Image (tube, grey):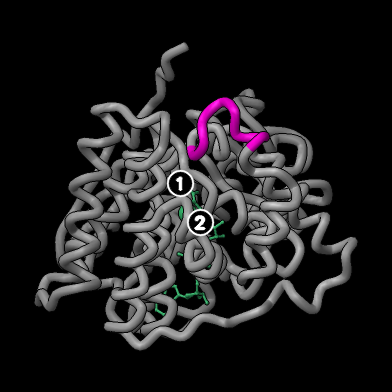
Amino acid sequence: MYKNFSLVPKVMFGRGSFAQLGDVLEERRTNSDGFVVFVLDDVFAGSELEKRLPVEDGDMVLYVNVDDEPKTEYTDLLVDKVKQHNTILPDGIVGIGGGSTLDIAKVVSLMLTNPGSSADYQGWDLIKNPAVYHVGIPTLAGTGAEISRTAILTGPEKKLGINSDYTLYDQVILDPELLKGVPKDQWFYTGMDCYIHDVESLKGTFINEFSKAYGEKSIDMCRQIFLEDHPDADDKLMMASYFGGMSIAYSQVGACHALSYGLSYVLGTHHGIGCCMAFDALDEIYPEGVLEFRKMMDRHQIVLPKKVAAPLSQEKLQLMVTTALNLTPLWENCLGPDWRHIMTREKCLELYLRM
Ligand code: NAD
Ligand code: ZN
């Protein structure tokens, strides 16, 4: 079966493009009772960026905290807050932040028009009704969340995205100026998420010319960003993230992402750093990629936490292994249809004990 997926229909790119957000929203504002919700990473509370938001009377600035990655419970709470603010549906939702905030804003826009808890929709194409119009504005680059048809959530039973065509942003604004001021470690980890998307897509068995076209360009830009010096590195990173997301849209990620889900579920490890920790243990599967990744780490003097799994109980280690091995398509992409014979529980545990 060939995938037949929607794409983000409207994209604005360029330094300073954030200033046009007001014009973009103007087209969507209905009448004087209408309102827009700005879902803003609380790292920006009181910042210059917040002052530049085109907030009008009746609008809502909804601060979100991403110290922990998005949980279903938390997004349900945020949806209630919007409903308390106004009983009518908003004219638009604007997500401003890194991958976590972008995903939260997607969920809020979906859950305003779909009944129940966000946990009911973790999976593929379970969303029934179109979302409220939503705009995504990344302030960190690498996850590809701005372009993907998923919003990743940790629920009571699983960490799994809400995957649907309705999840996609209606509009994204890619302004490289917004990346200014990201702490260096975070810049590196989220950037490596993109590099790893590219490696896993390009080295996977699902690879095809569509994914290759985007993945090869994205990895080339990652090399320029992380192994060379360029004054427009932030512009490159914005586009590398977008292209990395496009590459996996028609292929899949692999072993590193599967293992990072285990780390995240059991230890709460954040996506970017978790992918880095897992990738560093994957010499056997991605030998060239891991070598190049280590060069990038050296160049930016990044030191990863070590031996995080070793102190865990057998029970927790086994839960990590189960979480990772449940991600069948990722392993199939990485190792082929016979992957269960290669990535046994013992092998998977051994990889965790290397991290
Ligand atoms: P993040 O959004 O979790 O943010 C990391 C930290 O950086 C936070 O403390 C945040 O407040 C801070 N931050 C963000 N922008 C900043 C800025 N401009 N200046 C200073 N600080 C800033 O990080 P991320 O790596 O972008 O996103 C990871 C999340 O993305 C995870 O929740 C993961 O599940 C999700 N993800 C989603 C997709 C998708 O396709 N939907 C893909 C990959 C990852
Ligand atoms: Zn990723």
The foreground one among 325 and 165 is 325
Snapshot quadrant of residue 29:
top left
Residue 92 shows which numbered tag? 1
Residue occupying the point 49% across, 34% down? 333
Q: How many marks?
A: 2
The foreground one among 175 and 1 is 1
Part of the protein shown in magenta: 334-341
Query: Spatial distance from mark 2 to mark 1, Cα to Cα?
Result: 6 Å
Residue 37 shows which numbered tag? 2
Q: Earlier in the sequence, mark 2 or mark 1?
A: 2
Say whether residue 336 is magenta.
Answer: yes
Residue 57 in view (yes/no):
no
Give how far across and how far down residue 10 sits, in percent. 27, 39
Residue occupying the point 59% across, 28% down? 338
Residue 34 in view (yes/no):
yes
Snapshot quadrant of residue 239:
bottom left
Magenta stretch: dominant secondary structure: helix
